[in-house]
Amino acid sequence: MDVVSLALTVLTAVSAAVVTATGAAKLAAVPDMRSRADHLGFSVGGFRAIGALELAGAAGLVTGLAWAPIGIAAAVGLVAMMGGAVVAHVRAGDRPVDAVPALVVGAAVVAVLVLQVRTA
């Protein structure tokens, strides 16, 4: 396995794990996510839908290791979702530091996207 393939595999696994964890928490509507949904102006049902989309995106990232077009599509969708998360934090009047997790995940997924395109 070359360095690019290894980097793609590691970044995909880490990104998918993080997105799976947050997506599952949203889908399960754990108390912290209910509170976040309310703070950001989402209904619990809306936040659950976002969680389901995050889980689909994580699955797409992993599937992309076998079939690049799915990984590319999933990465594009997740980058858009992380951008939406940053916008939601700004609209809620949060401090910039509150948007850092979405920015970090978004940056990692951009890296996955670049590597997917490079190796496709």
Image (cartoon, grey):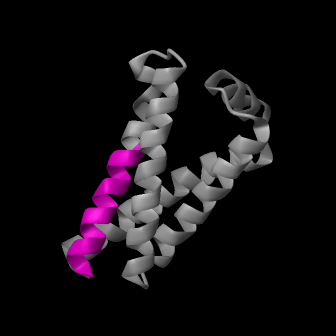
The image shows residue 56 at horizontal and vertical percentages of 60, 64
Which one is nearer the viewer's eye here, 39 or 112?
Answer: 39
Q: Residue at x 66, y 50 (%)?
A: 51
The span shown in magenta is: 105-120
Q: Vertically, is 91 above or below 76? A: above
Q: Vertically, is 7 above or below 99? A: below
Position of 53 with respect to 91 (left or right) is right
The image shows residue 70 at horizontal and vertical percentages of 45, 77
Position of 29 with respect to 20 (left or right) is right
Quarter of the rendering occupied by the C terminus: bottom left
Which one is nearer the viewer's eye here, 61 or 40?
Answer: 40
Q: Residue at x 25, y 64 (%)?
A: 114
Quarter of the image where one finds residue 32: top right
The image shows residue 20 at horizontal and vertical percentages of 60, 55
Q: Find out whether residue 110 is within the magenta segment.
A: yes
Quarter of the image where one finds residue 45: top right
Q: Vertically, is 109 above or below 43? A: below
Q: Residue at x 71, y 43 (%)?
A: 46
Position of 9 with respect to 31 (left or right) is left
Q: Find out whether residue 31 is within the magenta segment.
A: no
Is the stretch drawn in magenta largely helix, strand or loop? helix
Q: Residue at x 32, y 68 (%)?
A: 8
Which one is nearer the viewer's eye here, 19 or 81?
Answer: 81
Quarter of the rendering occupied by the N terminus: bottom left
Q: Vertically, is 29 above or below 61? A: above
Which one is nearer the viewer's eye here, 63 or 90?
Answer: 90
The image shows residue 10 at horizontal and vertical percentages of 37, 64
How many numbered marks appear? 0
